[in-house]
């Protein structure tokens, strides 16, 4: 192992492309100077296709969780009823945020590792007519599940006038989304996942339906007040100090997306997902989710004959490779591989090869090349 060499394969923060790192190393500029206005002016139109929207994408200095709280405090009044679909740790985080703001929260739990069935939510809304907003997680990072938000939006809007608010933190930039066409009312993501940046930016997109609700809210946050961000962005500015260096990097990220093509970006993520899953199936190591529910950005593996944390420790000690563990009741039972953003099929072949070696070193005997071969075959077949 080389001291300066590391392999970061967690579902965020993710590796940053060298050209993005170089962009962020530019000299600092005045955050109220014309250079920053010009930067935001160039960024604004190129962000929209990533979210599948014609709305402006609001940029807030903060983490992904800051974006989740922004959605809650702007779209919901204290005392309102909301429904939170919990398919893992980050659905649970939406519950915690709502509870913190004295919102009457209905919690709809799905077994971890499964995606929500839209018809269940339709039934629930028929029985609870006072709900003002439904919260869901697009990619549930803690389980590697991609929830069917398009179908959820459809049943929610057919059944009620409620807003549909989506945490897209570990999906946007790695999974196709068409916010406007699908009927998502607020869509949130963060910079440190498939957007290929360090932590520190959150993005929020708001539908016209949601703006009508937000504009009547007389108790929004001071810092997270979305109407302030919308008003300032019209003038190519932000209401508070922006993360200027991250904006430099964002401009380069959008250039990389444009060069590769968003359809190709999404296809690459699907290919990496399928390669990873094919490898573990060939190694006879169980996966947490079904193929249908699996996310293109993170894969959760649930071994039944070795300790996943022993594998993680061996990967870190021997190869300086970091993969994620489980959260809450899955802690010590799963490990998770992030394959999003600055990641390619070549990286997946490397990861699987290293994992095969580490498995043998911790006493789980596997034939070397079995998983790599399956991933190679999947890659040669087009990754489908």
Image (cartoon, rainbow, N blue to C red):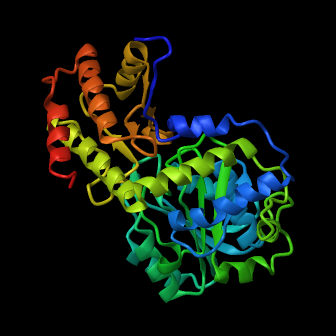
Exactly how many numbered labels are in the figure? 0
Front residue of 275/78: it is 275
Residue 53's place in the image compared with 246, above or below, is below
**Residue 346 x/y as whole percent:** 30, 36
Residue at 58% in and 63% down: 46
What residue lies at 77% left-to-right and 73% top-to-bottom? Answer: 77
Residue at horizontal 22%, vertical 36%? 285
Residue 360 horizontal side relative to residue 175, left or right: left
Whether 57 is drawn above or below 12: the answer is below
Residue 87 in sight here: no
Position of 338 with respect to 126 (left or right) is left
Location of residue 83 (image quadrant) = bottom right
Q: Residue at x 67, y 56 (%)?
A: 67
On-image quarter of the C terminus: bottom left
Position of residue 152 in the picture relative to residue 219 (left or right): left
Q: Report which quarter residue 336 is drawn in.
A: top left
| The one of 107 and 17 positioned closer to us in this rendering | 17
The answer to whether residue 171 is above or below residue 29 is below
Residue 261 versus residue 215: which sits nearer the camera?
A: 261
Q: Is residue 297 left or right of residue 281?
A: right
Q: Position of residue 43 (x, y in %)?
A: 64, 59
Residue 265 in the image: state x and y as whole percent.
39, 54
């Amino acid at each position: 192992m080389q001291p300066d060499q590391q392999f970061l394969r967690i579902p965020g923060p993710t590796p940053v492309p060298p050209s993005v790192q170089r962009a962020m190393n530019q000299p600092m500029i005045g955050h109220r100077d014309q250079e920053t206005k010009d930067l935001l002016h160039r960024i604004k139109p190129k962000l929209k296709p990533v979210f599948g929207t014609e709305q402006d994408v609001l940029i807030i200095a903060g983490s992904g969780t800051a974006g989740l709280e922004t959605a809650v405090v702007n779209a919901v009044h204290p005392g309102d009823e909301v429904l939170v679909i919990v398919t893992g740790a980050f659905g649970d985080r939406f519950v915690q945020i709502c509870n913190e703001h004295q919102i009457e929260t209905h919690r709809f739990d799905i077994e971890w590792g499964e995606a929500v069935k839209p018809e269940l939510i339709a039934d629930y809304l028929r029985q609870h007519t006072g709900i003002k907003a439904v919260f869901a997680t697009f990619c549930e990072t803690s389980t590697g599940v991609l929830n069917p938000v398009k179908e959820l939006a459809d049943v929610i809007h057919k059944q009620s006038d409620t807003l549909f608010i989506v945490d897209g933190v570990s999906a946007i930039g790695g999974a196709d989304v068409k916010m406007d066409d699908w009927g998502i009312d607020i869509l949130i993501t963060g910079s440190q996942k498939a957007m290929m940046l360090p932590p520190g930016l959150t993005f929020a997109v708001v539908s016209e339906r949601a703006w009508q609700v937000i504009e009547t809210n007389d108790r929004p946050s001071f810092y997270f007040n979305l109407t302030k961000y919308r008003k300032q962005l019209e003038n190519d500015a932000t209401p508070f100090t922006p993360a200027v260096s991250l904006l430099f990097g964002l401009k380069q990220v959008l250039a990389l997306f444009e060069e590769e093509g968003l359809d190709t970006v999404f296809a690459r993520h699907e290919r990496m997902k399928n390669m990873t899953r094919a490898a573990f199936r060939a190694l006879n190591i169980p996966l947490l989710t079904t193929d249908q529910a699996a996310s293109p950005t993170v894969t959760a593996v649930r071994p039944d004959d070795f300790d996943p944390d022993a594998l993680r420790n061996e990967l870190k000690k021997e190869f300086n490779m970091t993969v994620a563990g489980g959260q809450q009741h899955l802690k010590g039972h799963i490990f998770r591989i992030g394959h999003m953003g600055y990641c390619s099929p070549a990286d997946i072949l490397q990861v699987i090869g290293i994992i095969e070696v580490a498995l043998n070193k911790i006493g789980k005997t596997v034939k070397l090349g079995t998983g790599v071969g399956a991933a190679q075959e999947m890659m040669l077949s087009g990754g489908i």
